[in-house]
Image: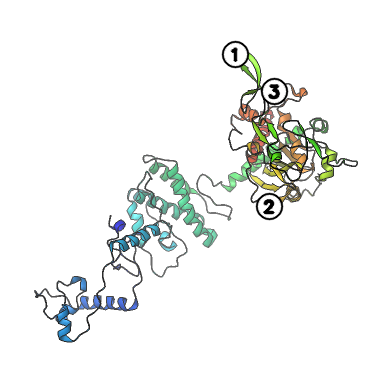
Amino acid sequence: MFASSGLFTVIPCPSLPACPREAFCIFSHAQLPPTEATAFTASSTSAAANPIRKVKRKLGDITTEDDASREPAQRCVRKTDKHYQDKGEMQPTIQRHRTPISAMEAAKARREALNTIAPTTSPASATKTTSTAVLLSRPQFATKSASKTPATAPVLSGPPSLKIDLRAHSKPQFRQAVATQYYNEFLRIYKPLADTGSNLASSHAVDQEKAVHSKTNQGSYRSLASSVLQRLKKRPLAISEEDIGIDGEWLDPQLKAKENLALDDIWRGASKYVQTLEELEANGYPIEIPKGSPPPLEETQICDRCQKQFDRKEILEEKDKVACRFHELRIRSKNKDGEKIKQFPCCDAPQGSRGCREGPHVFKEDDYLSLHGRVPFLETRKTNSSDGQRHAVIAMDCEMGYTTGGFELIRLTVVDKAGTPVMDELVKPSHNVLDLNSRFSGIVSLEGAKYTLDQARRHLLQLIDKDTIIIGQSLENDFKVLRLIHTRVIDTAMLYPHPQRFQNFRYSLQRLAREHLQIRIQDSEEGHDSYEDAKTCLDLVRLKITKDVPK
């Protein structure tokens, strides 16, 4: 109550300059001017040396030497103007108290200062360990012990003061005690990392406490906080700057090494699932560099959406931007009243109805020789097996958009055999963008894209070689926009074939994930996520390999 109304912010703190409650002190910590500070110190010293005698005086009486030692706020009488005129003295200027408005402003500034996370103790004080049971039952003990810091101790980083959250389900004192305990353990774990470890200990203590608070309620907070603390106490010292993280995110390097060995065993048998050249060619994959003279890009094209003929333009007029009416989703069969009908899922319109969306005409080239004439294809090269940067297995997914030059790459995502992203970049098309295909690509802007197609492809070739197994769903379109020739491919659409595959039917990745992995993907209104698609393909292949391993 007092701190919020600023009633004591006009009074200098009596514990300066080493106040143990600096973050929560109700008194003023502002520096006094030299004259006032000297007067304040002198008066305090005089008052301590000469105890004030209780003497009744009348208004207007001349003060004695004892009265001169009193503070102005302690006096019960005031010298009148007539007194100074009779004595010929200059009347001193009386410093008025702050107005309520200025006091409120000072209180507001102090509340804003409390919103910052500041260390309260040095590592020297944090090394003193206290019983966990005591700190969890008496959180104020942790605050008091943390405040006892020698003034000469080096301050690097310390237990952070948590921001007070009025919506929190647990008391701020208890949360502060938990964060302090977490800090002590993180400081021990990161001790080999020197100063970097000290700073990490402070930030990870805050992150750990927030993670515990977000997963619990008032009744379960204490239990989970204690369990996490016990796990941190059993955690070994960090061996490198990569061996960091809060509980729940950190992985034991030994367990991680065992997982890598297990993954190596799984992917060692992946070669037998690689599609043959005949299968790749039958499904539209480029298997060699096209030969011959590429035809020029024709000015007249067939719209990929409405199938109407149009003249290609590099710069569109206003009427060209709404010349095409189309349905975003392909027509599908649906049972209605016992009868199978065909409808467009985007608007439930029957077959043959007018499109529900409008936009510019777009086109896509599929002829490899024509594509090779626009941007040449490249083959992955055989590299030295001792090169550690090359991956034996990756999963890849590309997102494409329509431009005035056709269908171009706008995002490239690659994950390693463990599902960790090793490349995820937006790509700048070489022509003007007509449609980013946001409903499917999930991309609404190319702001921040720093790679061209050639740069993105060179980056990819640093991660793979001719022997790398590339996993994905229907990657023939990805290789077309990448202008890449690679023949060691596991296509999940062929790994899990459709019964009518000879009629060019394929299961969608969404359906494969739902039926085999029991997860739902691509159900967001914001579009697909290329990382999610690549990771799903990786999991589908790993599931297939694991099931086929004899037990």
Question: How many residues crowd mark 1 within 10 Å: few (<14), some (14–19), many (20+)?
Answer: few
SS at circle 1: loop
Q: Earlier in the sequence, mark 2 or mark 3?
A: 3
Judge from the rendering whether residue 450 lies leftward or rightward of residue 296; answer left or right: left
| Quadrant housing the C terminus | top right
Q: Residue at x 32, y 60 (%)?
A: 104
SS at circle 2: loop
Q: Quadrant of residue 357?
A: top right
Q: Identify residue type, mark 3.
A: Gly
Marks 1 and 3, how far apart at CA: 20 Å
Question: How many residues crowd mark 2 within 10 Å: few (<14), some (14–19), many (20+)?
Answer: few
The spot of residue 188 in percent (x, y) is 48, 56
Marks 2 and 3, how far apart at CA: 42 Å
Question: How many residues crowd mark 3 within 10 Å: few (<14), some (14–19), many (20+)?
Answer: few
Judge from the rendering whether residue 40 lies leftward or rightward of residue 148; answer left or right: left
Q: Earlier in the sequence, mark 1 or mark 2?
A: 1
Residue 395 visible in the displayed image: no
In the figure, 58 relative to 442: above or below? below
The spot of residue 450 in percent (x, y) is 68, 52
* Residue 337, label in figure: 1
Q: Nearer the viewer, residue 336 or 49?
A: 336
The residue at which mark 2 appears reads as 450
The spot of residue 453 in percent (x, y) is 74, 48
